[in-house]
Amino acid sequence: MIKAVRGTRDLLPPETAVWNFVESVVRDVFRAYNFQEIRTPIFESTELFARGVGEETDIVSKEMFTWEDGERFDRRALVDAWRRAHAGKSFEEVESYSPGEGITELECFYDETHVAEIVMFSTRADEAVLNALAEAVSKFVGPPSHFNHFSETVRGRLVVPSPVPANSESMTEDGIVIEKLHGAFHKSSQSLTLRPENTAGAVRAYIQHDLEKRGLNKLYYIGPQFRRERPQKGRYRQFYQIGAEVIGPASAGSESPARDAELLEMLATLLDRLGITGWTLELNSVGTATDRSAFNEALRKALDPVKDKMCGDCQRRAVTNPLRVFDCKVPEDQPIIETLPRISQFLGEDSRKHFEAVQEILKSVGVPFTLNDRLVRGLDYYTRTAFEFTHGALGAQNAILGGGRYDGLSEALGGPAAPGIGFAIGEDRLVMSLQESAAAKDVVRKPDAYVAPLGAGMNAEAARLARELRRQDLVVELGDETFRLKKSFEAATKAGAKYILIVGENEVKAEAFALKNLATGEQVSVARAELARSILSSS
Ligand code: AMP
């Protein structure tokens, strides 16, 4: 059996109803705050994430799904790879020519078992190439001195690049060997990556489409993200994020603490609307790039005498990007991390004022928060406000969402200055923390009625009736005339329908139908025109 890949999963009904519920509440709330949807591609060039997220982050250094886009095929690389793969065999180039498009070389080799082969290199094993090779084999006369005594065993071999890092060989009915060989893509082929997060893509789109012309952009997205993490409860390799970004030129007010506070207040509203109680908002300021460089310097100094006692990752971070030490989850390292200087001691006047203004607005609108000066977030691009909402019920992976300001990101990606702030909610975790709540239990809508055609020729009548009811906003399940009454009842019960509606010849003639409540067993005859009202009034 072929199963979903580890770290990925199928979302099945009825759980998908909870996802739909979450997404519809989210869209409603975003609309109230005047956010609009953006959809960016699921893969981008690797460079975007290297520059936008940061090479030293866990995400970029070890969690990305990256591949070489091999559309641009390099014949020489393929031939070289092939020569390497067959280093033990003797072969000889007998002729070099281009017999057709995509077919770039013809060689011949004969191995220890004395089989002479005509080898072709091509981008793919399509019919035209195979035919050309078959023809070459049939015409092959070879340099007599070498091949005379093998002439009856000349065979064709087609070498094509393998899309996966593995080599394989198969044979066609005509006896042509197809060899798939790895490592034959052009050096200038593109490195692509499945998006591990969506902010970099959104900012790329902002730059590419000159969105600064629109002033302040308030964008949101909902979609899958990919990280090669060790799968565990609440942590997947394909997971879903709901996020929003406020970005624009400073003249449009994108730098104002009012934007930070508005975003945080919107999140509090969102969680409340979803019925998630008991969340905690943890807040910090990670300062400007200037504040951070002073902090990094101090951290480096403080880490120097102790780093040897820390985990391998921290030893590396201590040198390359000391701030990331605060991401460390290794329990033995925590006492050391506790003694390190904190960013709060290094905030410049501007950062401090900005942070205080954010807090003041939050207090005024009644959104509770706690300050956490260890919170630095896993992405390099954050500046000033950084935050996380956590939820106790989630266990070790307790962050439902995280975000922060990224004032320098657009410039880091080669764009104009565009201060911004955003967040990403882990939708998988949001749904998990919601599953137990009452709100989630109500979101699955069972059929109001099961329409059961009874007897030959009744499918058409039943379909007509179902259409009438569905047009009046009822959820209707439709049966089949081949079902006997007992089977229809079983199907209706299995579907969780409230009512079963029998459509037989007599009912159609009388324009009145037997409507049976499946829970109480009560049955009444209802006129066609009254059916929808009668079903809806009871629920
Ligand atoms: P980040 O982009 O790392 O700030 O993550 C934002 C949110 O996405 C986190 O708070 C989690 O709720 C969620 N998240 C991140 N990684 C994963 C994952 N591998 N599986 C499930 N949810 C995740």
Image (cartoon, rainbow, N blue to C red):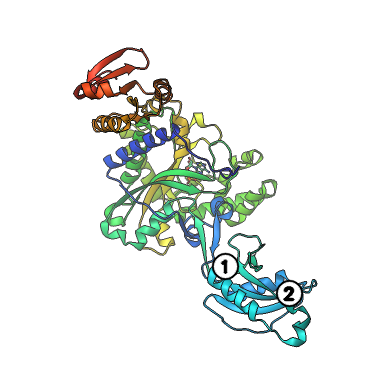
**Dot 2 beta carbon under 8 Å from ligand 1:** no
- Earlier in the chain: of badge 1 and badge 2, it is 1
Percent across and percent down for residue 130 are 58, 71
What residue is rendered at 42% in x and 52% in y? 199
Q: Quadrant of residue 55?
A: bottom right
Percent across and percent down for residue 215 are 27, 56
Residue at the disc numbered 1: 125
Percent across and percent down for residue 67 are 55, 60
Tell me the distance, in whole angstroms, between the alpha carbons under discs 1 and 2.
22 Å
Q: Nearer the viewer, residue 348 or 510?
A: 510
Q: Nearer the viewer, residue 196 or 138?
A: 138
Percent across and percent down for residue 522 are 32, 12
Q: Does residue 198 appear in the picture of this structure?
A: yes
Q: Nearer the viewer, residue 234 or 479?
A: 479
Identify the secondary structure beneath mark 2: helix
Q: Nearer the viewer, residue 517 or 290?
A: 517
What residue is rendered at 47% in x and 60% in y? 48
Q: Height in image: 216 above or below 10? A: below
Closer mark to the observer between disc 1 and disc 2 = 2
Residue at the limit of the structure toward the left, as seen here: 529
Quadrant containing the N terminus is top right
Contact check, label 1 and label 2, Cβ < 8 Å:
no
What amino acid is labelled 2 in the image? Thr
Residue at the limit of the structure toward the right, as seen here: 112
Q: Quadrant of residue 213?
A: bottom left
Q: Height in image: 534 above or below 330? A: above
Q: Height in image: 205 above or below 401? A: below
What amino acid is labelled 1 in the image? Ala
Residue at the disc numbered 2: 153
